[in-house]
Image: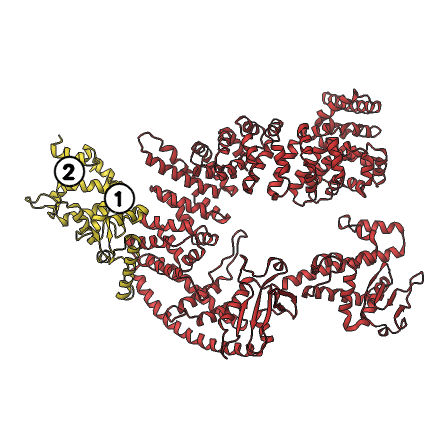
Chain colours: A red, B yellow
Amino acid sequence: MGVALTRSAQWTAAGYGTRTLEITPLNEVILKEIVMFVESFIYKHPQEAKYVFVEPLEWKTNLDPSAFESGYIVSETTVKSEEVDKDGQPLLFLSVPHIKIRSLGQLSRLLLIAKDRKLKEAQACIEANRDPVTKILGLDYNTVKEDTSTVNILDKITKDEDPESEIKMKVGMLLKQLDLHLLNHSLKHISLQICLNPTTVKNDIELLKHFSGKGEQTVLESIDYTSDYEFSNGCRAPPWRQIHGEICYVLVKPHDVETLCVTCSTEGVFLNGGKTEDEGEINYERKSEIYKDLVTFLKEKSAKFSENMSKQRKREERKKERKEKEKKKREKKKNEKKKREKKKRKKKKGEKKKGVGEGNKSKSKTKQNKTKQKRTTGEYLLILCTLSPLASPGSCPKSAEKIEEILSDSSSENEEDEEPPDRRQEANADLPSEYWQIQKLVKYLKGGNQTATVIALRSMKDFNLAQETCQLAIRDVGGLEVLINLLDTDEVKCKIGSLKILKEISHNPQIRRNIVDLGGLPVMVNILDSPHKSLKCLAAETIANVAKFRRARRAVRHHGGITKLVALLDCAQSSAKPAQSSLYDARDVEVARCGALALWSCSKSNANKEAIRQAGGIPLLAHLLKTSHENMLIPVVGTLQECASEENYRAAIKAERIIENLVKNLNSENEQLQEQCAMAIYQCAEDKETRDLVRLHGGLKPLASLLNNTDNKERLAAVTGAIWKCSISKENATKFREYEAIETLVGLLTDQPEEVLVNVVGALGECCQEYENRVLVRKCGGLQPLVNLLVGINQTLLVNVTKAVGACAVEPESMMIIDRLDGVRLLWSLLKNPHPDVKASAAWALCPCIQNAKDAGEMVRCLVGGLELIVNLLKSDNKEVLASVCAVITNIAKDQENLAVITDHGVNNDKLRRHLAEAISRCCMWGRNRVAFGEYKAVAPLVRYLKSNDLSEDVDNCITIHENGNGAVKLLLGMIGSSDHDLQEAAAGCISNIRRLALAIDKARYT
Amino acid sequence: PPFPKIKKIIRENTFTVLEVECLIRLFHSLVERANVRLNNFGLDRNAFRAILHSVFGMTDDMLMNRVFFAFDKDNDNCINAKEWVKGLSVFLRGTFEEKLKFCFEVYYLNGDGYISQEEIFDMLKNSLHQQSSEEETDEGIRELVDITLKKMDYDNDGKISFADFEKAVKEDKLLLEVFGPCLPEAKVECQQLKLVKGTF
């Protein structure tokens, strides 16, 4: 119940203390469920009903003492229950108006007594007791959080062997069940909500507006928004109200009642407190029930509205019938006409379109039947259209057709999440004049010869094709089909004209999708072979625009587009012949640029990356990198950057000496180019040689200086990423200090988007592997923001932050600060993070903390449940987690008292040792860990701890240590030279066991 | 051996000596084939139109007539060897400016230096497939005329001057043959270049 109450229930935002439950449908449902649960509790669970709460639930009741009857001792102002606890205290005590209840049984009875006021009582109870579960079961019970599971609770309870705790547990479980039930219920409720959205609301209002005005016939006198400003999401409510799902406020004046101030929210429509006279502010409080939409609401509020609305509807229906007849006639005529046309036309252009249109018609007819019973926006629109002044007899059928299209299209499939839902233009009364003009042009495209087609195309290009209305208009009048069909003809000029338009309108995500659906990509891919350079360019540029989503990229590849695009890159090279004029050069460069542009879009799919490589794209891209044209460099570097996620690309990039050019272009003036170069370096610098190359070509300095420009966040993310990866090399980290990048990085720890933060923290983590840098970070005040970031939720960020904090903690002085900032506790709590990488990274970071803390033992003991937590992590099957946890344990184990605690935690010595031994041997399989073990000085205490154990006597352990752990042996050897006698002895023992075993193996081999 | 007349032709054109020789030889064979009268040594309109159709893939009769007049610089209703080579030079190797001028010449017929509204209407007359009624088609064509005038008539005098034409085409090369194809098509052009290079 706790979770449901805090997460699902909607509390008013009135602030602390006086918070009350808002009266929303969801809350009502939750309350009802709780009441039902409590009411029936006394019958269903008579045993548990007697359980006495740890703390009473207290609230102010409205119940009168006189309401209580048998079973209670009633006086004028007090009521005591006859039921008492073992100390003789009554389980219910009412002293008007305060009531205290200490058992679920009494709660049950109270609700029965309260009768129709029980909801109010339940609400008052929950408002006054914000954490009822804690009060019922006690604080300690509630702190046992989800992650430690019911097993632990069981443990705790069975230990005591107390019948009372058993009941307590049952109550706990019942409450937990209720909680789950409530959550489920509220989820169901939310999904059932009618959810209005800004568009539907807007349509309703527009429609009603249309029917409003003076006179008896209209449905309303007036309807107006309270605010003229519309946010981009379609809402008019101020943002802080939008949070509550409110969309807009409307002032409605019906004929027969006073002006109503209405709130339209996603949950429905309701009356609000009205607009105050003096300030014009709206009182947002709900004053009525919630209705599912505006029409229902108004029908309820105004009889006149209801009456006129139904009249209106009848009129519409008659009109529609008449229109339908007319339309049929007209359609007949049209079909005849089309048949005649068809004979003349060789091309299938027209047919295709017509087929589509007819399909729509039949589909939408069945739809219309459905909509008759249930009024939808679609029908509203229909009504609207027939009435609109624009609907002169000539244009009427067109708009009607369009609506049918809308209806039939609204169910269109949404196959890929990255694709936006299909949206037709609003068929409202004022279609832009462009729409009709474009429709006419498309008519000429369809019915004209080459000359007329070119003129129409040229004229279409003069529209503002960047504007969505025009883009959608072209599509909605069937222009896309024609444009794509034109690409299939032999007329170069038509193709050019068509591509010029397609190139512009394909910036629109919906149009892209339509182009792919109409089979535009294969045709464009074919054009890439054309001898016409301008045609090739246009086709490639259009492909670059269209291939912004997966399905399109796949289509390009399947039709052989990648190979052809890569071939375009070759143009610049072949034209290097001296005989050609510079004019030709420029055009070839342009072709290559367009090719690169298209490849950049395509390279976002992994299969395409491979296809580009196979088509021999890498050397060509490398060659193009040598040019100095920025427009060329951006797509080229962009493609390389995308592809550098693949291992074989990185190798090729190194081999083709691409890094040098990337570094060179970091110094460019163009921000986009800088960004792409930095991204490419980021991708490639996982490799040590590449990192060195970046340094050798002088790439670190421009990177560092780019840090100072923080306005362009994309570029900043790319630059910080590159710095992060580069600083993995120590030499680079030193260089960055020289360039004063560390200070800047520390400055970037606050107020940056996560993409940037991840990289900045990553970079600091790497840089802090060096002493000077650690000191620098501390001096710049970097520790505080770093520790602050430990509470984030982004996994990648957490991994980096923990690493950085760990790196800083190597410095005792920094460690003091981290400890003071509560960093150790935060790190420790990250051991509970579900993601193993975060766990491991946090554990590694804890090692230096424990080493360098002043009183490490005490510090660790102070963390409640900390040791238990870490011992439990030994059960993890993630190697990295195991390794890190072992390292932590060895550090903890230096403190005898903690060692004892660890042992107490149900892990007997042998078990722990076995885990440790396993962990050591596993960890030694990776060189990095071996080094880490050495660095964290983990081996010595480990070995010491293992002194008396069976580790080295266990054959398997020895084999693993021997085979994988040359480093371990080396360390052991080093330890023999240590001044610590015990350690010497242990290490020597270990080695002797290992040697003995090795000899035994050798012997076995030779005999 | 190149005689002086050819030398002069070479100077004025973009072809090489060999190419010009080939063109002239081609011209003679075409003339022979066309079987023209000897006193009017050259290609008459019908013969030339036949060539435009068969070699350059042109189809529109009216435009072919206009191209003939554009070739026929001396207005003697006959294309001589010089006019042939010169015309083909623009046709096949013309610079953008030359082509621009050539197209404009083809489009303005009555010689006043402007393309008038009526002329445009004439040229676009057949550009729309027959709609349901003649009026509708006519209306469509008138609309197309309006569109082009709106696009190209920069000085708003209701007709297109060479300056208008030049400005519009320079802005968008698609407008070069705005009133109908009067240059060899790009792909034909490629073939023809091979042809000129002496394989004919």
- Name the residue nearer the viewer: A955 or A903: A903
Chain of the residue under the numbered disc 1 shown in the image: B
Question: Residue B45's spot in the image, x, y percent?
Answer: 14, 49
- Name the residue nearer the viewer: A753 or A28: A753
- How many angstroms separate mark 2 from mark 1 (CA)? 20 Å
Can residue A19 be seen at all in this image of the molecule? yes
Image quarter of the C terminus of chain A: top right
Q: Is residue A342 above or below residue A592?
A: below
Q: Is residue A215 left or right of residue B39?
A: right
> Residue pushed farthest left?
B39
Q: Is residue A739 left or right of residue A109?
A: left
**Mark 1, secondary structure of its residue:** helix
Question: Residue A175's spot in the image, x, y percent?
Answer: 78, 59
> Residue pushed farthest front?
A278
Q: Amino acid at mark 2?
A: Ile
Packing grade of label 1 (10 A; few <14, some 14-19, many >=20) is some
Q: Is residue B180 above or below residue A332?
A: above
Mark drawn on residue A558: none
Q: Is residue A371 above or below residue A486?
A: below
> Residue pushed farthest right?
A87
Chain of the residue under the numbered disc 2 shown in the image: B
Q: Amino acid at mark 1?
A: Val
Q: Is residue A973 above or below residue A768?
A: above
Image quarter of the N terminus of chain A: bottom right
Q: Which residue is mark 1?
A: B188
**Mark 2, secondary structure of its residue:** helix
Q: Which residue is mark 2?
A: B24
Q: Is residue A949 left or right of residue B62?
A: right
Q: Is residue A766 left or right of residue A666?
A: right
Question: Residue A65's spot in the image, x, y percent?
Answer: 86, 72
